[in-house]
Amino acid sequence: MVLQSTKHYVSVTGTLLTEKARYFAEHLGHENFKASNGFLDRFKVRQGITGQMECGEEKSVDPDTVEAWSKHLPDICRNYSPRDRCNADETGFLWRATPTQMLNLRGEKCTGGKRAKNA
């Protein structure tokens, strides 16, 4: 679940893992199951999951989009003087913050998207 989630840019937290564990325990008929901190710690050790800070903006843009724009942008910019050019990335308004920490498999690269500027 952790590997699939991180490939789809979903941050996995301890709370998410314990909620999923409770869900599966209930559906499998384990009535006395407790998704405690001890359970979570042992599960992470068994599965090789470590807590890491998300860093970088690698996952915030599609590489194909970057490639396409890097070919067309010089032609577009030629029509404008340097004083009329700006970095539109810095003018965006991000309205939703995402978690700063996530769980990841040991040895896997831990990268995330841009952070909300209002958080």
Image (cartoon, rainbow, N blue to C red):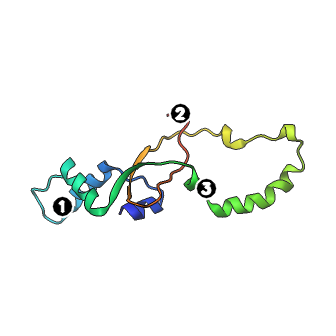
Give neighbour class at mark 1: few <14, some 14-19, many 20+ (Cα, 10 Å).
Answer: some
Residue 2, located in which quarter of the rendered image?
A: bottom left
Q: Nearer the viewer, residue 77 or 39?
A: 39
Report the residue marked by disc 1: 25
Point out residue 55 in the picture as x, y percentages from the top left corner.
51, 48
For marks 2 and 3, give the CA distance: 20 Å
Report the residue marked by disc 2: 118
Proximity of marks 2 and 1: CB atoms separated by less than 8 Å: no
Which of disc 3 and disc 2 is earlier in sequence? 3
Q: Nearer the viewer, residue 84 or 109?
A: 109
Residue 26 appears left or right of 17:
left
- The amino acid type found where label 1 is placed reads Ala
**Residue at image point 47% right, 48% down:** 54
For marks 2 and 1, give the CA distance: 38 Å
User: Do we see residue 36 in this rendering?
Assistant: no
**Residue at image point 33% right, 58% down:** 49
Of marks 3 and 1, the one in the foreground: 3
**Residue at image point 44% right, 61% down:** 108
Counting the numbered discs, the total is: 3
For marks 3 and 1, give the CA distance: 37 Å
Residue 26, located in which quarter of the rendered image?
A: bottom left
- The amino acid type found where label 3 is placed reads Val
Residue 84, located in which quarter of the rendered image?
A: top right
Q: Secondary structure at mark 2?
A: loop
Report the residue marked by disc 3: 61
- Residue 97: mark in rendering: none
